[in-house]
């Protein structure tokens, strides 16, 4: 199927492809659904969309469903999982394109899964990757300005997200469900979709709550839930998953048990521990807001931060603000390479550095060398944050070059070398 689609694309002149690109992507989605026999019709499909928290919420939803005894398929930025089988997402796409999402859903059907939990993005929506998927429920987490350069404006970004939500209005809309974060200003727009069931959640549902570097507690529906997840943002993620689970009639005690068992996932405040006397955390945080939330989870702890800023040629406006956030929270900042593509990595670092006023900082282009320096600087009890890539499988360079990569694996290697004097 993939070979066929690539062949079709090569037969279309470039000038014509640019003109018909939306139609082309819609065509691909339709062909993929037809080829794999519309697999979503045999599943309960849950989409999760928003600016932040999508991957974490997909994992939490899947964990609750499995605790309730259901067979589940999961597709997000970090991995693909069908029942018991899981593999790392090496595509660099949070939402699968071409016919790959339909193929994934067919695999879920063949494995006798009941639910498919899918991370859905605005970029994916622009390319109609959600088209021809019979979605039964959507969870909206939050919205803040992101991908503005590719969308053209914040309003167009919101509209791309709303395009996903409006798919719920098709078919048996009276049976479909929307779950929205009522603390977000855009929640009313998502709750306006014409579906049969509407649920909302907010931080007030967890009060009183407490958070720390090792986890948090919240009082939900009269029950104290102890999370192994740090930060207020993970309280919100847990509430999103719990609200959806309630919409499916899952018992509250089952929800509590699943949330308390859940541990951190790769690339999301992932702790790397080789016996060192300081913390090392790998996180996907790639916006100023998500960066502040990550740092805030370790309030009062000395932080050394490895910061790339953004990928080359995109979201330049947020670079300075990310520098400001790091300047506020960190004791020392090491600027390094993230995904420069065709842009000079030093130019990206300089843009980020414009936001750094008082904190000591330096530029080390080699990401491994940056980690090595950070670990040598770290004192007992400190925290080293490695942000921007999470589980990304490669560093993107000029002209589409790829360097295989794993922040967590490289961090482990450098920690072992440091601890054993290699």
Image: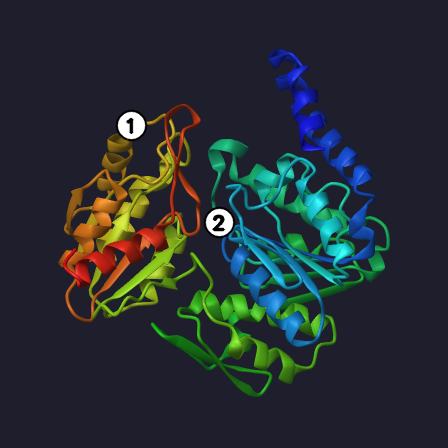
Whether residue 331 appears in this view of the structure is: no
Left or right of 107 in this view: 274: left
Label annotation for residue 53 = none
Work out which quarter of the rendered image holds the C terminus and state it.
Answer: bottom left
Please state the horizontal and vertical placement of residue 93, each as a whole percent of the image.
Answer: 54, 42
Say if mark 2 contacts mark 1, CB within 8 Å. Answer: no
32 shown above or below 289: above
Around disc 2, counting alpha carbons within 10 Å, would you say few (fewer than 14), some (14 to 19), or many (20 or more)? some
Q: Residue at x 77, y 61 (%)?
A: 112
Work out which quarter of the rendered image holds the N terminus and state it.
Answer: top right
Q: Which residue is mark 1?
A: 344
Q: Residue at x 27, y 46 (%)?
A: 323
Q: Which residue is mark 2?
A: 144
User: Along the polypeptide, which appears first: circle 2 or circle 1?
Assistant: 2
Q: Residue at x 71, y 54 (%)?
A: 192
Please state the horizontal and vertical placement of residue 180, each as a whole percent of the image.
Answer: 62, 61
């Amino acid at each position: 199927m993939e070979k066929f689609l690539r062949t079709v694309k090569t037969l279309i002149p470039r000038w014509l492809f640019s003109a018909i690109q939306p139609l082309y992507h819609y065509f691909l989605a339709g062909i993929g659904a037809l080829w794999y026999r519309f697999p979503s019709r045999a599943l309960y499909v849950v989409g999760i969309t928003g600016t932040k928290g999508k991957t974490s919420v997909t994992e939490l939803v899947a964990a609750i469903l499995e605790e309730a005894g259901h067979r589940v398929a999961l597709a997000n930025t970090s991995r693909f999982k069908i029942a018991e089988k899981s593999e790392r997402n090496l595509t660099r796409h949070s939402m699968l394109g071409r016919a790959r999402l339909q193929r994934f859903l067919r695999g879920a059907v063949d494995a006798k899964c009941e639910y498919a939990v899918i991370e859905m993005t605005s970029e994916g929506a622009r390319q109609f990757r959600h088209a021809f998927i019979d979605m039964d429920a959507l969870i909206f987490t939050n919205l803040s300005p992101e991908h503005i350069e590719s969308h053209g404006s914040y309003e167009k970004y919101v509209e791309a997200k709303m395009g996903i939500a409006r798919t719920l209005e098709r078919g048996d809309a009276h049976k479909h469900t929307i779950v929205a974060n009522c603390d977000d200003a855009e929640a009313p727009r998502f709750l306006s979709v014409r579906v049969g069931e509407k649920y909302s959640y907010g931080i007030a549902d967890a009060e009183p709550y407490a958070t720390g570097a090792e986890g948090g507690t919240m009082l939900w529906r009269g029950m104290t839930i102890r999370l192994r997840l740090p930060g207020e943002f993970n309280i919100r993620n847990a509430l999103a998953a719990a609200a959806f689970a309630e919409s499916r009639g899952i018992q509250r005690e089952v929800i509590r048990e699943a949330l308390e068992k859940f541990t951190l996932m790769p690339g999301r405040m992932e702790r790397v521990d080789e016996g060192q006397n300081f913390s090392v955390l790998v996180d996907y945080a790639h916006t100023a807001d998500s960066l502040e939330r990550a740092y805030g989870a370790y309030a009062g702890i000395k932080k050394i931060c490895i910061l790339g800023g953004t990928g080359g040629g995109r979201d330049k406006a947020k670079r300075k603000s990310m520098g400001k956030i790091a300047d506020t929270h960190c004791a020392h900042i090491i600027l390094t390479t993230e995904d420069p593509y065709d842009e000079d990595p030093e130019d990206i670092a300089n843009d980020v550095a414009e936001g750094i006023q008082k904190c000591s900082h330096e530029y080390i282009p080699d990401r491994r060398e940056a980690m090595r320096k950070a670990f040598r600087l770290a004192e007992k009890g400190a925290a080293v944050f490695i942000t921007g890539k999470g589980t990304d499988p490669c560093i993107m360079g000029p002209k589409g070059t790829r360097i295989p990569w794993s922040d967590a694996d490289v961090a482990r290697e450098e920690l072992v070398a440091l601890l054993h004097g290699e």
